[in-house]
Structure formats: C-alpha cells, structure tokens
Amino acid sequence: MSGHSKWANIKRQKGKADAVRGKIFTKIGREIAVAVKAGGADPNSNAKLRDVIAKAKAANMPNDNITRSIKKASGELGAINYESITYEGYGPGGVAVIVECLTDNKNRTAADVRHIFDKSGGSMGTNGCVSYLFDSKGVLIIEKKAGMDDDEMMMTAIDCGADDFNVGEGAYEILTDVGTFSAVREGLEKLGYAFVSSEIDRIPQNSVAVDEATMPKLMRMLDNFEDNDDVQNVYHNADLPEEEDEE
C-alpha cells in the first residue's frame, strides 16, 4: 500500500485528539443530509444513504447520531440545505490537491479554501486542473486481525466483485468500481466483515515525492483543510513517508 493510501490517512488521523471525532461525525451528518434530500429518508430505497450509513458505522458514529441526522435531513428536526462544491489546486511541492466541500455559504467556503492554499504556499486553480490525475474508486478498509489469511481474504473480496486488493501493514485495502461499490460492500457485510473505512475515494494515478523541507508545510495544509467544517474530503497525490502517517 503506497503512502497516499486510505489506511495511511486513517492512521495519521488516529493520532489526533478525540475532538476530531466530533468533526468527523458532523461531516458525515452533512453527507446524510445530502443523501436524504436526493433520495429520501428510507435507506432500503436509497442506495446513497445506505452507503453513507455504512461510512458512519465504520467511523463508529453512534446509531442515535445517525438517526438524528436522518430525521433532521427529512425535516422532522429542521433542516439546513447544503451545496456540494469541489475545489482543485496545487499544494507545496507541486502536489495536486482536490478539496470536496458541503456548505451552506459558498462565498465563505471559497474564501477559506483559497486562504489555506495561499497560506501553505500553494495555489487554487480552476475546476479540472488536477482532477484528471485521479481515478474515482470505491475503497473499503478491513483491519487485519490474528488468524486472517491474506490469500483467502483476497479471494473473498474478488468473489464479491472487487477490482483490486492490497495487503498493508495491519489492514486490507479493497478497491471497487464506483458502480459496484455498494454491492461489494454489502456482500462483505453479509459475510460478517466490518470496515475501518467505507467510501468513494479519489485515487491518484501517480504519486509525487516531497522533500523533507516541504513536507511540514504540506502536512499543515492537509490538517487545515481537514479541520475546516465545510471540507468533507481532501485528496492529494503526495507520497507520504510511513513515519508521517503514525504519530
């Protein structure tokens, strides 16, 4: 698994304070709101909502929080409308960066994102300036536990429809097409597997090496994006060294 893998990002985030967990729940709550608005409050008939609920459970979001987010989104508790908007640009060291946001104020979010790019020595570009460097894939992370066999896990994932399978230190990374993501996830769930992470991701086609002098600036930029309430996901093509992932 390369340095830009989902598992690497998860390990990096695990080293942060518990306060980050609250932010993650808030961000997932916004995704639930968008999914409910688009397809209704019943996960049985709303595949997108099922996917977001699975993501919430992988993040250990309490069921009460999930239920409350669905009720709020359906208008039972008063709803806020969020708009999806994506920004692209370059970070320090020429790293390509995609920032996906859900916001109730586009002007505020655009100013915040531009400020983070500028502050880090990067620059915000136009739509499409770096997205062609990434492929959208479903990514499922399963923690590797004692007694689990790599080959057996790989065959199980492939039988469920996975496109690719990576063995990392402490985790399995399962990749799917966007169109088959839900089916693969549900197939593995039925077999009793739980996920550390479950979502659609943007996978860089190639990674960019970043020198030691630039790495702290890049990490601060990524942290600043992730700490912003309007930012849902941040994707980049930097090859992060292993020691940067674990704190």
Image: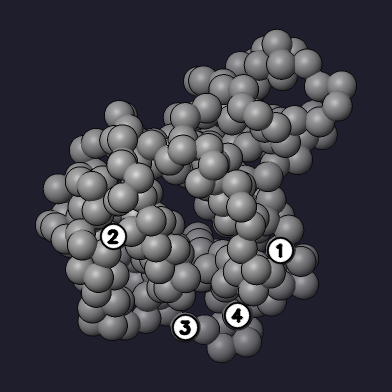
Disc nearest the viewer among 1 and 4? 1
Comes first in the chain, label 1 or label 2: 1
Label 2: which residue? 86
Give the residue drawn at x 23%, y 47%. 93
Q: Secondary structure at mark 3?
A: loop
Q: Position of residue 237 (x, y in %)?
A: 33, 40
Give the residue drawn at x 16%, y 54%. 127
Q: For the residue marked with disc 4, what is the amino acid?
A: Lys
Mark 2 neighbour class, 10 Å CA radius: few under 14, some 14 to 19, many 20 or more: some
What is the distance, in whole Å, between disc 3 and disc 4 at their CAs? 8 Å
Residue, far bottom: 78
Residue 216 seen in the figure:
yes
Disc nearest the viewer among 3 and 1? 1
Residue 80, which numbered label? 3
Q: For the residue marked with disc 3, what is the amino acid?
A: Ile
Q: Image height check: is 67 above or below 179?
A: below
Name the foreground residue: 48 vs 13: 13
Q: Secondary structure at mark 4?
A: helix
What is the distance, in whole Å, between disc 2 and disc 4 at their CAs? 24 Å
What is the distance, in whole Å, between disc 1 and disc 2 at their CAs? 25 Å
Residue 61, which numbered label? 1
Left or right of 16: which side holds 241?
A: left
Label 4: which residue? 72
Q: For the residue marked with disc 1, what is the amino acid?
A: Met
Q: Position of residue 214 (x, y in %)?
A: 30, 51
